[in-house]
Amino acid sequence: MPFEINAFVTTSTNGKFKETSRQVQELGEHEILVDLLASGICYTDCHYTGTEGLNLGHEPVGLVKELGSAVTNFSKGDYVGFSYLQSSCLTCDQCCAGDDLYCEKRVMYPGSGQNNGFSDTAIVDARFSYHIPKDIEPKHAAPLMCAGSTVFNALYSSNLSPTASVGIVGIGGLGHLALQFANKWGCHVTAISTNPSKKDEALSFGAHAYLSSKDFATPGFYDNAPKFDLILNTASVDLPYDDYIKLLKPKGQFLLIGLPSKSVNVDAFPFIGNELGMRGSLVGGRRAVRLMLEFVARHNIKPQVEEYPFTVQGLEDAFESCVNYKARYRAVIVKSSAN
Ligand SMILES: NC(=O)c1ccc[n+]([C@@H]2O[C@H](COP(=O)([O-])OP(=O)(O)OC[C@H]3O[C@@H](n4cnc5c(N)ncnc54)[C@H](OP(=O)(O)O)[C@@H]3O)[C@@H](O)[C@H]2O)c1
Ligand SMILES: [Zn+2]
Ligand SMILES: [Zn+2]
């Protein structure tokens, strides 16, 4: 039986969308048709607007509506989410080691640009989809699929000790979840932000301390500044990196998560003198997403969301909130049937 997919797609105007529909004749054997209930807007989506005809969104959750012939891990009606990694070869060394995220044949969001989260329904590979615990509401589950997975994976892949001191730079969609995860990890957590009006909420999310990056310029600031074993940079801008590197303890690590617009240039001497490290960190593969969902359910981690209707207008308003750094802390489009 053919399916009709109604999606919101980008137009040539930044932040503007239109509705389209297309027919799909049948599901591939490993595919599921998902009736979407909620979809978060990540800052990464903002990088793709202005190109005509893309169906965006990589924080979707919904209910399984139809199953391909070889699907064994889902049943109709199951609560499901999908994330940034859309498929991998499943047989290479990376895939066999659980590092499917780094498979040479991986397909990452936005993939074909046709089967993503700002859509009534989506067709996805069941092997790259996740069972969502039932007591997490769709609007709270959606931001976990990218923002939650990304910051969880960054902490998990850092082999973080619970005695570590962690700084989270940028208290937005990713950052406000990173505060919650790092607190539950047992670490001492500091929110590092450009916006002092976020201080109280940052503390309520689990930060033990708040540091304003505006204070970096105060004479003598670094004499008494706190020092971190790990800094997660989730700011969506180019930073004066050396100012942040000075906050690392010897052997400390700086993780690049927020996307810079140009090459990252840093002073090499602190890296050599104190054996510092800087590395990138990418969303999460299937193992990390599953562990993240288990961790969230156990520790009752909950994104703070701004809710918008699941309509073109709702999506445009949600985008505007995201792109202007107004969202507190994740804009999510939600179908009324999901509440
Ligand atoms: N590596 C990955 O796998 C991955 C995955 C998802 C997203 N990302 C990237 O991660 C970044 C964050 O995404 P998001 O959805 O969390 O975005 P977001 O909700 O907009 O948060 C970004 C935060 O950056 C901070 N910021 C804004 N302007 C700044 C400035 N001039 N100087 C310093 N900080 C500034 C703000 O925090 P304060 O107000 O607290 O300063 C803002 O809340 C984006 O670049 C996104 O593309 C990467
Ligand atoms: Zn994202
Ligand atoms: Zn592979």
Image (cartoon, grey):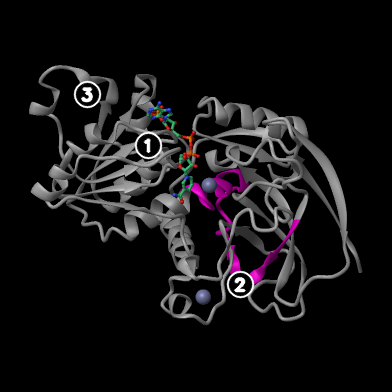
Q: CA distance from mark 2 to mark 3?
A: 46 Å
Closest to the observer, 300 or 99: 99
Q: Identify the residue shown where x is 78% and y is 49%.
A: 120
Local crowd size for mark 2, using a 10 Å CA cut-off: few (<14), some (14–19), many (≥20):
some
Please tell me the numbered disc located at residue 216.
3
Local crowd size for mark 1, using a 10 Å CA cut-off: few (<14), some (14–19), many (≥20):
many
Q: Which residue is mark 1?
A: 205
Q: Secondary structure at mark 1?
A: helix
Q: Identify the residue shown where x is 29% and y is 40%.
A: 265
Please state, as top left, top right, bottom left or bottom right, where the N terminus lies in the image.
bottom right
Residue 132 within the segment the image draws in magenta: yes
Closest to the observer, 240 or 212: 240
Q: Identify the residue shown where x is 64% and y is 47%.
A: 57
Q: CA distance from mark 1 to mark 3?
A: 23 Å
**Nearer mark to the viewer, of 2 and 3:** 3
**Nearer mark to the viewer, of 2 and 1:** 2
Q: Secondary structure at mark 2?
A: helix
Residue 45: give x, y in percent of width and height.
Answer: 59, 42
